[in-house]
Amino acid sequence: MQALPHPHIPLQASEGALLRARAMQAYLLALRQGLARYAEIPPVHLMVLNEADWAARVKHPYGFPFQRTSLREGLYLFLPARYPERLIWRLREALVPAIQRAGKPPGQPGDFLDLNLGHEYAHAVAVAWKLRTRVRWVDEFLANYLYLLALQGALPELYPKAKQWGLLLAQLTPSEPSLGSYERKPKRLSDQLWFQGQFTTEAARLVEEKGDALLCGLLEAAPLKKSTVHKLLVGLEPHLRDWFASFAPPKRPVTKGLGWEEVGS
């Protein structure tokens, strides 16, 4: 393992992964620049690990980038030194229906996963700013919003790609599209990707139409509370009420039962 101290993105990399780690560190530093003007961001540690080093440190399956974040224990991002082929093929297989509807994706699955490390960084920033609510879909949506806001400001050449990936993922067909199901049930990969697409496209709308207005309101209200965050979001951005409603399952038509006098007629 190689450790490279840094005031903002300290880095640890497995043997042979240093070049990749430095490139991803530079990406995260650019995103940090796009967000640091709003509030202080503590160091976020980047771990770029091969499969053996990964297994020695975390229990998550090797492959998907993820974050392990706590104000007490520190903010950490985990990225594989190389995406396993089994993960790339799973992603390709899951994306086929969306590609058939929307056309060619804006890159390869590995490009999407690398870009999405910014989403994981946004989760860490949300924890640091006390914006995490522990309502899973709210936390995912806000991470997408922070991520796209940072991309648009600091890396505008990558913003269209992130949005295009979101539009593509939104073309998938979920098994159950309600926000309540997102909280209750473990998700298939295609479901996870569909929700990610929905959160990304709505976050992009907010960034493009309202800029940082939602973030400023959230920071003023922090720390966010699980019991009031829905009301807060709608108060800050009334359009979200209709967006939330779009996830509700369709109401079944009410059929009038037979009256006693109609039985047997």
Image (cartoon, rainbow, N blue to C red):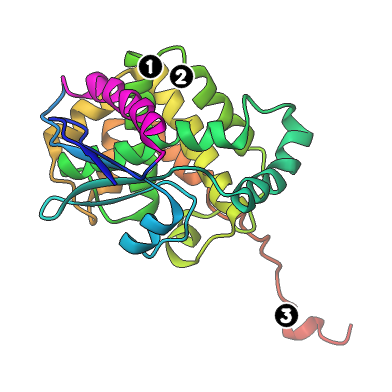
Identify the amino acid type marked 3.
Answer: Gly
Residue 98 in percent (x, y) is at 71, 38
Can you tell which quarter of the image residue 10 is in? top left
| Percent coordinates x, y for residue 21 in the rendering | 36, 33
Q: Is residue 33 magenta?
A: yes
The x and y percentages for residue 20 are 41, 31
As displayed, is residue 30 above or below residue 14?
above
Query: Are the residues at dot 3 and dot 1 in contact (C-beta closer than 8 Å)?
Result: no
Residue, disc 3: 259
Query: Which numbered marker is on residue 152?
Result: 1
Label 1, residues with CA under 10 Å away: few <14, some 14-19, many ≥20: many
Magenta stretch, overall SS: helix
Numbered range of the magenta stretch: 16-37
Q: Which mark is residue 159?
A: 2
Q: With 94 as the anchor, is 179 left or right in this view? A: left
- What is the CA distance from the residue labelled 1 to the residue labelled 2? 5 Å
Task: Count how many numbered circles sit on residues in the image.
Answer: 3
In front of the other: 106 or 198: 106
Residue situated in front as seen by the camera: 113 or 138? 113
Determine the CA span between mark 3 and mark 1: 62 Å
Q: Earlier in the sequence, mark 3 or mark 1?
A: 1
CB atoms at circles 1 and 2 under 8 Å apart? yes
